[in-house]
Amino acid sequence: MTSKSAAAAARATVYGYPRQGRGRELKKAIEGYWKGRVDTDALRATAAELRRTNWRQLAEAGIQEVPTGDFSYYDHVLDTSVMVGAIPGRHRAAVEADALDGYFAMARGTQDVAPLEMTKWFDTNYHYLVPELGPDTVFTADSAKQVAELREALALGLTARPVLVGPVTYLLLAKPAPGVAADFDPLTLLDRLLPVYAEVLSDLRAAGAEWVQLDEPALVQDRTPAELNAATRAYRDLGALTDRPKLLVASYFDRLGDALPVLAKAPVEGLALDFTEAAAANLDALAAVGGLPGKRLIAGVVNGRNIWVNDLTKSLATLGTLLGLADRVDVAASCSLLHVPLDATAERDIEPQILRWLAFARQKTAEIVTLAKGLAQGTGAITGELAANRAALASRANSPITRDPAVRTRVGAVTDTDARRSQPYGERAAAQRAHLGLPLLPTTTIGSFPQTAELRVARADLRAGRIDTAGYEERIKAEIQEVISFQEKTGLDVLVHGEAERNDMVQYFAEQLTGYLATQHGWVQSYGTRYVRPPILAGDISRPEPMTVRWTTYAQSLTARPVKGMLTGPVTMLAWSFVRDDQPLGDTARQVALALRDEVNDLETAGTSVIQVDEPALRETLPLRAADRPGYLGWATEAFRLTTAGVRPDTQIHTHMCYAEFGDIVQAIDDLDADVISLEAARSHMQVARELAAHGYPREAGPGVYDIHSPRVPSADEAAALLRKGLEAIPAERLWVNPDCGLKTRGWPETRASLDNLVAAAHAVRAELPTVD
């Protein structure tokens, strides 16, 4: 096919779309179902209406092939486990009794049964439920969800493409089930899994699917020859099936590297590749393998993970280059639009000039359609869109919002000394123990306490003018008093003020820093029904005035026990925001670090002896390719130290990380030079404690003994058992006792019971320790 005919065939499509609805209807329906206020039929009706709304919006915008199967009540990887029958033994009875309740039990656990482990989806802030597999796993096909959603879309008269997690990625994301040897490799189950995928593909073809998309993002990571061979076998076998739709294998988030020739040669009909800046090497690599003659290429040229308008002229140039490399070139975002908010036009509080710079899911859809039209019909067909796009890009580039000379001068004056504590850890630890006087196995929490309905109402009342600032602050003071009183009665050793005044751990700070923009409706799914509104980091960052000192010192005035100051670290402030793309991330991180350094120093001056700077996103933002990691870890750890290094030796610096794989960043954790680190460990059965010990980590650590992402209350015996596991790896003089994460999403009854049990466990295990003369 000539370039001209390839261009004429260009279609606009997407891989996935935000699930929640304009008013987060899905969240409300699911949480209503959990509380018994919404029945099964009403929940399913809400979900079906949201799917129809999404598909109609996409079709009306000009998307010619809509995705199906990407919608989920909780998580698409969990949906895949259901599709292939990989139900953990402890959940089978619940699933057999009621499929929907059993599904949620796998996600959230019950009082008697633990949920699946949860961790981050590659280098995003989306969390997936980790499949549990073993040598005895028996896969069985259940294509009901995928077939039903395809039929729904087809009944609307739409061209639809089911989207599934690919078999290789599914197995690479899995872990050995509890009780299975730690060295078991789930990829050995590939030959057992492929017939199940074959059955699902056959069912989808029978239901009317012309194409099915198999997502294989794990192949953009560094893969061994054995893993690449598994991908070769998987798509050789699936490609050889006679009773199947056309297959489109999709990758995203980075370059494919050695996996590109594997997929290019596979007997499948199409590939979907990321061609944004993060994966620009895919273009040269595709040319090097001779392109995709006779195949379909979906080109992800619109960034599906950030919210800045696309450079349409640049994307059209990339698309033009690709025309000679495939039989047909279609246009898409680089990944599912799940990772961005729904619609920028809903934002009424952002200046119109700045709003022109932003593209949420609906705006990205319009960009994709424009690019497909320009590719098919020539730039003359989109002259108006190109002119508006150039104007928006120029407006942003020339705006004074993006540059503050004072901030840049301060960053330029930073030296290596600014990022080093004045004394080594051993000397600091002795000073801190003398100053704080804590017992062995000190107990604490991660920071936040339940955000009650009353607190949310108070914030809404303040915004609406129903109460004034003084009235709001009295409510916050009352909440802090209750939180401090509870912690003292429970017997916790290091207290927190509970963060009653904070809407979100990133947004709260972003709203008080220059250079950030806040949204009102920019919700993005983090996990399950947990949605966040990532702020937009648009310009240079500074701190006009203290952000946390007032409430922390108020809490400290209520107790003689130490109260932790609580901040969100610079890497997480970047990772959980939509960060600017017009300068290196390291430069932006240093700006944020210096603003936070001012806050840390002010907390210390106000008498705060323990300061926690959370960095849960340090591992999440780790580049997917090993070759890219040293540069990232260099500026990321420096930014943390720049934030924290200005305090006295007897001020104890904590950090916190959760829900990620930590084993491959233990050296970076060490390089942070924090005095204490708390980490998620309950669902992974203290794996991180063993990883720290294997590394020889020399500082104090608190691997969590209470899984806060589940409503179940761990017993004191259960917490004590986890604590004893922690002691096998970390000596008592360096081991802390704490939950996995903050308690914001939990209710007060379960929080009280769980923390009572946590403290009881710490006391029981302390009593077992040998006395020291």
Image: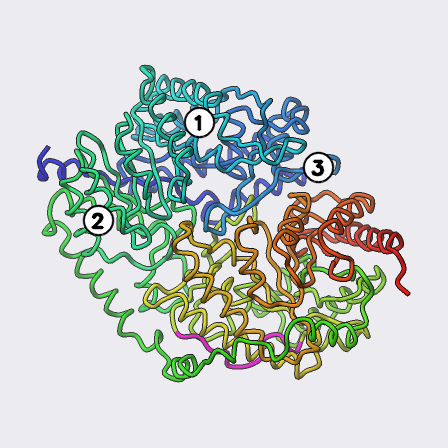
Identify residue type, mark 3.
Thr
Q: Residue at x 66, y 84 (%)?
A: 605
Q: Is residue 159 left or right of residue 147?
A: left
Please tell me in which quadrant of the rendered image residue 206 appears.
top left
Label located before the other in sequence (1 or 3) = 3
Identify residue for label 1: 146
The quarter holding residue 164 reads top left
Which residue corresponds to mark 3?
A: 110
Which residue in the protein does label 2 denote?
Answer: 370
Q: Amino acid at mark 1?
A: Gln
Task: Residue at 17%, 33% (x, y): give it.
Answer: 327
Mark in front: 2 vs 3:
3
Whole-percent x and y of residue 409? 39, 84
Span highlighted in magenta in the image? 540-550
- Name the quarter where the C terminus is drawn: bottom right
Give SS at disc 3. loop
Q: Nearer the viewer, residue 758 or 393?
A: 758
Left or right relative to 269: residue 660: right
Q: Check if mark 1's residue and mark 3's residue have beta carbons within 8 Å.
A: no
| Structural crowding at the residue carrying mark 3, measured as other residues with C-alpha within 10 Å and reported as few (<14), some (14–19) or many (≥20) | some
Q: Amino acid at mark 2?
A: Thr
Question: Is residue 341 or residue 760 the one in the foreground?
Answer: 760
The residue at the point 61 percent across, 54 percent down is 695
Quick one: label 2, few (<14), some, or many (20+) residues within 10 Å? many
